[in-house]
């Protein structure tokens, strides 16, 4: 019994038996470690004007004043408020990534 315990501890120590749980078993992959491309320098995806428009649309949402496009219905979903803010920023020429096509 003691020999089995010692063997298990030794295998755990050198990494052959795996970790104590699934999280410990998986080592980070190179793609997970380096997530900012080859250059290593992270660029901001959204410019300050875009951030300002999204902030304004979120404030309007919280006040209950944000309306959707043609229908004019009141917006209640925060994700939709962000989308409206980014759309307004795009129209003003702010730095915003392209909309993803389906």
Image (cartoon, rainbow, N blue to C red):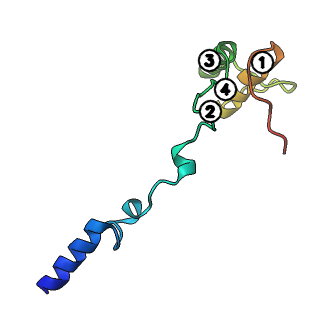
Work out how far the residue at label 3 is from the one at label 4, CA to CA, in angstroms: 16 Å
| Residue 35 as seen in the image, left or right of residue 81 | left
Q: Nearer the viewer, mark 2 or mark 1?
A: 2
The answer to which of marks 3 and 1 sits earlier in the sequence is: 3
Q: Nearer the viewer, mark 4 or mark 1?
A: 4
Q: Position of residue 97 (x, y in %)?
A: 75, 28
Q: Position of residue 20 (x, y in %)?
A: 31, 66
Front residue (pair 67, 50) = 50
Work out how far the residue at label 4 is from the one at label 2, CA to CA, in angstroms: 15 Å
Work out how far the residue at label 3 is from the one at label 1, CA to CA, in angstroms: 12 Å
How busy is the neighbourhood of tag 3: few (under 14 within 10 Å), some, or many (20 plus)?
Answer: some
Q: Residue at 64%, 13% (x, y): give it.
A: 48
Secondary structure of the residue carrying tag 1 is helix
The quarter of the picture where residue 101 lies is top right
Q: Position of residue 10 (x, y in %)?
A: 23, 72
How busy is the neighbourhood of tag 1: few (under 14 within 10 Å), some, or many (20 plus)?
Answer: some
Residue 72 marker: none
Q: Residue at 61%, 17% (x, y): give it.
A: 59
Residue that badge 2 annotates = 39
Residue 88 marker: 1
Q: Quick check: marks 2 and 3 in contact, CB under 8 Å?
A: no
| Residue 78 as seen in the image, left or right of residue 1 | right
Residue that badge 3 annotates = 55
Q: Position of residue 78 (x, y in %)?
A: 63, 31
Residue 77 seen anywhere in this rendered image of the structure: no
């Amino acid at each position: 019994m003691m020999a089995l315990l010692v063997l298990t501890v030794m295998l755990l120590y050198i990494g052959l038996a795996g970790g104590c749980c699934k999280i410990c078993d998986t080592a980070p992959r190179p793609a997970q470690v380096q997530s900012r491309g080859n250059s290593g320098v992270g660029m901001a995806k959204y410019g300050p004007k875009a951030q300002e428009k999204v902030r304004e649309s979120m404030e309007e949402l919280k006040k209950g004043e944000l309306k959707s496009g043609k229908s004019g219905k009141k917006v209640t979903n925060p994700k939709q408020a962000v989308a409206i803010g980014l759309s307004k920023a795009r129209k003003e020429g702010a730095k915003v990534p392209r909309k993803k096509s389906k």
